[in-house]
Image: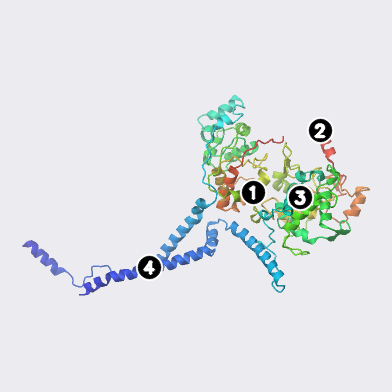
Amino acid sequence: MKRREKSVNHIAQVNENFEPWEPNQPIPIFVIALVFALSIWGALTYLSEFGTVHDKTGPETSPAAPSTSPTTEAQGLESASPEVLKLVYSGKDNMWSCPSCHGAAGEGSASTPRLAGQVADYLFKQLEDFHNGSRDDASMAYVVDALRVDERRALADYYAQIPLPSGVAPTLGGDLDRGQILAEAGDWEQNVPACFQCHGGNGEGVEPSFPGLAGQHPQYTFVQLARWHAGARGNSPQALMDGISQALTPNDMRAVADYLATLPLEPVQQAH
Amino acid sequence: MTTNSTQNGGPSRTLGRLLKAGALGLVLFAFGTLAFQSGIWNTVYSKVSGIPDTDQQGIEDQALANRTAMQAAREACLKDVQSDPPPVPVSADGYYAPPAESAIPDTPFGESIRRGRDIFVNTGEHAPRFVGNSQSCANCHLDGGRKEHSAPLWGAYPLYPAFRGKNQKVNTFQDRIKGCFTYSMNAQASPSGGPPPLGSDVYVDLESYAFWLADGVPTGAKVPGAGYPKVAKTELGYDYERGEEVFTANCALCHGDDGQGRREADGRLRFPPLWGAEAYNWGAGMSRINTAAAFIKANMPLSKPNSLTDQEAWDVAAYISSFERPKDPRQTGTVEENRARYHDGDDIYYGQEVRGKILGAGVSREQTSAASAQ
């Protein structure tokens, strides 16, 4: 009885004019517009930035599995004094060794650069630049700071004298035809000279300042171009690569990085 | 009851709302698509992101479309003389757009064009008998003679035959290239001992290449981008001592501190020498400081045109011109007489004293190798 009384009481309390639904508050039209605009922006950005990677002509190839390991293909892995070899393979004190990231023969991988056969003075300058901060890389700065200048020189010379055939292939899905044009002829409308104008007729590098590009991992090449493009790498002499990279579109960078990875690495006779 | 009526109207209202929202979405989508396709999107995106809006394919297509339009207009003109004359094909930046390298025809004439291009780009390898130094045509005519403000072939070809003060006669295009071999390639020191004789295949092929590049420039027309843009004289004038600093900061990276460029042990030339026995001789246009300053300002360092000030361009050109180079092949008497005859009033150190020595005696390969052997 009590219960019923209670419910009766509640019914009595019901406000006849009470509207149980929230009054209709339309979402402001500009918010809808914004949502649509943002989703369209997002979708189109996705399509234009990433979709093309998969449509472009470059075959989605993975690096060809080397038939032999870099250490058996490379020469001169032992051509250094015992001290230098110890530095290379064991690192200094508790510091990481070079091969722990750059591979047993300095072949590198993905965005870790190949060092084998690179221009000696170029390698040395990069070590100096990591040390003095003009090339920004926390890991390399950490490692290099533990080395004396003569040790840096010795390491650069050690890796420069290792001949090692190219073991890379395109991985970025870049347009190889466009990459070839950029490498061989350049795009002078954008003030982009041919890569080969300075980096050697086959991208093998030119002493003392121009590193070899052939045989380098396309990911590494692309990342470096992107870093110059974005102003994150600043140690190119006369800021030459800064300007050139800024003139390249992301697709151009992919194209040229991939094309350079198709080149055989011919042994160079450097002038002395 | 009021509540009831609201509930009855519910589904149709919801439907209406959905339809309206859908229509609005369609309108917005259409708007967005149009904005994207019109190119506004790319422009805004590149402004906001800082990634340059270089639709390269678009630029090339544009130049190509202009060339196609020219061909179409030519055909139309043949049929109807009253139709519009063919336009000059230009690229996005407004300069004449030469045909793409891939458009070289697969005909005997195309073969000649290709040989001409090869000679132009690597003269020492493809015309070795007539090159007496370490230079190629493309060293001073960048991008294989295509680049504007780098004395492009398409700027020069339509201007010949022409009377030239340099030799006081009407020169054909072959005469003009013969001059390049005589002075810029220092043909006197070449295996054949001189430039190719007129009528030589070397000239024929180079002429084919130049004609093909210039196909679209009206004969006789001086078009924008031809030659090197003159650099205004500065108050300070030029000074080779000031120029040394400019050279070290901007040029030595490739051309070396000694200005000798770089050649690998296997003979492949990487960067051209600027003075000495392997450079252009005292009769070459580039040995004049004003010409060198004009080339440098508009083209050097590669990828950074016009990055030097006028003053720096004059000074560094003076520095490069302040060293000995192969002798002027026109010289018969003394340097002084030759200066009076051929270099009077020029901006050139020829016959003048620099670092305590009169320049102009010339330097030969034999002298250089003898000096390095010692």
**Position of residue B276 measured from the top left corner of the image (x, y, whole percent):** 81, 43
Q: Chain of mark 1?
A: A
Name the residue tied to disc 4.
B21
Sequence-first disc among 3 and 4: 4
Which of the image's four quarters has the N terminus of chain A? Answer: bottom left
Labelled pair 4, 2 in contact (Cβ < 8 Å): no
**Position of residue A202 measured from the top left corner of the image (x, y, whole percent):** 65, 42
Under circle 1, the secondary element is helix
Horizontally, residue B374 falls left or right of residue A272, namely right
**Disc 2 residue type (three-letter):** Ala
C-alpha gap between disc 3 and disc 4: 66 Å
Under circle 3, the secondary element is helix
Asked if badges 4 and 2 are on one and the same chain, I answer: yes
**Position of residue B6 measured from the top left corner of the image (x, y, whole percent):** 25, 72
Which of the image's four quarters has the C terminus of chain A? Answer: top right
Nearer the observer, disc 2 or disc 3?
3
The residue nearer to you, when weighing B162 against A18, is B162
Under circle 4, the secondary element is helix
Evaluate whether residue B262 shows in this view: yes
Q: Residues within 10 Å of mark 2 (few under 14, many from 20)?
A: few
Horizontally, residue A26 falls left or right of residue A142, namely left
Name the residue tied to disc 3.
B137
Identified at 79% across, 61% down, the residue is B159
C-alpha gap between disc 2 and disc 1: 36 Å
Nearer the observer, disc 3 or disc 1?
3
Q: Chain of mark 4?
A: B
Name the residue tied to disc 1.
A240
